[in-house]
Image (cartoon, rainbow, N blue to C red):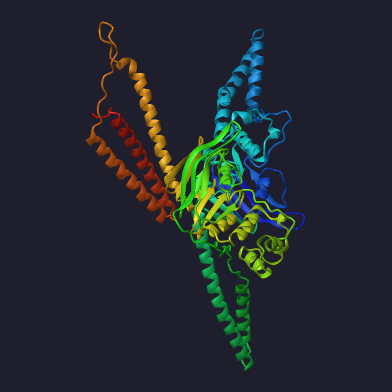
Amino acid sequence: MIDISVQNLKKSYEQGNPVLTGLSFELQAGEHVGILGRNGCGKTTLFRILSGAVDYDEGTVSIAPGKRLGLISQIPVYPAEYTTEDVLKTAHERVYRIGRRLDELTAQMAEDASEAVLREYDRLSADFERLGGWDVDHERSRVAAGLDIPQAMRERLFSQLSGGEKTRVNLARLILEDTDILLLDEPTNHLDLHATEWLEDYILHFRGTVLAISHDRWFLDTVAQRCIDLTGGQAEFYPGNYSYYVVERQRRFDEQLKKYEKDQAKLEQLQRAAAQLHLWAFLGNDKLHKRAFSMEKRIDKLAQTERPRVQKKLNVKFSEQEFFGDEVVILEGLSKSFGEKRLFHDLELLIEGGDRIALIGDNGTGKSTFLKILMQEEEPDAGWVRFGPSVKTAYLPQIIHFEHPERSLYDTMLYEEKCLPQTARDRLAQFQFTGEDVFKPVSALSGGELSRLRLCMLMRHDINFLILDEPTNHLDIASREWIEDAVDDYGGALLFVSHDRWFIERFANRVWELSDGEITDYRGSFTQFREYKARQQAIKAAEAKRQKETVGAAPQSRPRAAEGGGPFVEAPKKKPNPKLLARVERVIEKLEEQLSALDAEAEANASDYQKLLEIDARKAELNAELEAKYEQWEELSEGTGNK
């Protein structure tokens, strides 16, 4: 069954700028599809057309009858007195309406127990139960917790929330409404890692149709079954997730380029042949003109073929200061609080040359404050920070600010970098600011362009310690790739805060997780860190289960006190069996080696979607086996599994 059908859709704005020029696609019920394309290609316009917010010029748009469609980016206007909790409750308005009617019928049945009243009561009771009426409060709390909407936020007026908070609440409301078709416009922009992973898990288990615009490549890799790339107002289709799209897009480009070059060679051959035929015709054989004219028609057709274009990458590098010594930054006893809220305390950390550290954690845990302390923009409550003697630092903040946004890009470079005019133009051109663009005011730049301009200025200086705060936040995929290209060849120490898991996986060789006022320091990639966390959670779950079983069995297995009222003495614990422990530890090591080998195999087969599915299935089996062995190891360590 088709949930969404778009045929030959065209849309232009008043300035005559065509956005959609004949877009056509269909979505089957239950499909999860990612929408890709550069900013301004028409992605959000498409969503607004599907939701009925704007009209279109030509074509047809059909939504399956009876299907409820919800759009994340549209935040309805609520009464001024509505709290966040009131907004969330609007998702269950039908359930509450049925509940109120059931209360009325209950009171009415005390005096009128007619067949019509009983029949209505039975019908509404069945509807109430089918719609989950008994569980709405629990479900609301579950979704709110998953999307990081704490009780304090639920009690605040909705009108007082920030734009990001309103987006999260609106996402929660749409999920609670059990919408049939979800249109997600950058749903992860205001979510931390925990909430993003919760949303991914929800979408993976969502049976309805999902159409998602996202610049979060990890998110698209996880939830998208296929991708639609909007280019030139039309659609190109890719039957796989984002990783498949990247490989297939390059394959198609290479194929088109090869065909173009072949056509150009043929074009030159035909042009020479046509010229030769015309020459022979003038020498007395007029019939050759006709053959030459036929060739020229083919020449005209081949000449219309455009060379396939690929987005240019930044060809720039940081100017690096040579680093002497091992210690980049030393932190001892570092603590910081705001009022009664303690962000972190007694941190003891060391950053060494070559470290590429991702600082991760939930929103509000103090990551940006930590970076500001390093940059001496904030004072710690206790402890100190010491930099190595040859450390030169550069900082790209989350919110990029220029003191004189009215100045042009060109003037900004001249005044702030104190460089020569030609140097300013050359440097801006390296970062793809060319022609009249250099005379635009800084205030007219997009988020991605502001990041590019700030990087353009930072990269002129000799540095060996780079600090980035959410460098890819609110940027499209092309802008994220520009920043990644710039950072890729940088060889100094790197510390960055990011929720972009693709960026973290690409650059981090060490992960700092800030949680409950402490930093867990893990040396390894982000994927290895996630696997470590999964194993730790499995061990904790196994330990909790063991303790629960021990407590539950205690009254039956506890030995009685000796006759005569003597003191109770517990039976001595069994000593761990060292041979069994060693055997299980060897099995655990082998399983971990097999998982590492599978990671390497997955990297080697990154373009083989079917192979990756097989590898993931095998990894799931090994992880399950590994969890069981960890549980057995725990039991043996406690002396409870020596049989």
Name, please, the residue furthest toward the bottom.
283
Q: Please, is residue 592 above or below residue 633 in the view?
A: below
Judge by depth and name the residue closer to the eye, 117 or 69.
69
Name, please, the residue furthest toward the left.
579
Name, please, the residue furthest toward the top.
564
Judge by depth and name the residue closer to the eye, 441 or 395.
395
Q: In this view, does 626 lie to the left or right of 92?
A: left
Give x and y (percent) for residue 586.
27, 42
| The quarter of the displayed image where residue 308 is located | bottom right
Give x and y (percent) for residue 189.
60, 44
Give x and y (percent) for residue 6.
63, 49
Count of marks, rendered view: 0
Query: Residue at 25% of width from left, 39% of height from top?
Result: 583
Give x and y (percent) for residue 241.
50, 50
Q: Is the C terminus in the top left, top right, bottom left or bottom right quadrant? A: top left
Query: Residue at 63% of width from left, 83% of height from top?
Result: 290
Judge by depth and name the residue closer to the eye, 398 or 308.
398
Q: Is residue 557 left or right of residue 104?
A: left
Q: Is the N terminus in the top left, top right, bottom left or bottom right quadrant? A: top right
Q: Could you tell me if residue 231 is visible in this image?
A: no
Q: Could you tell me if residue 527 is visible in this image?
A: yes
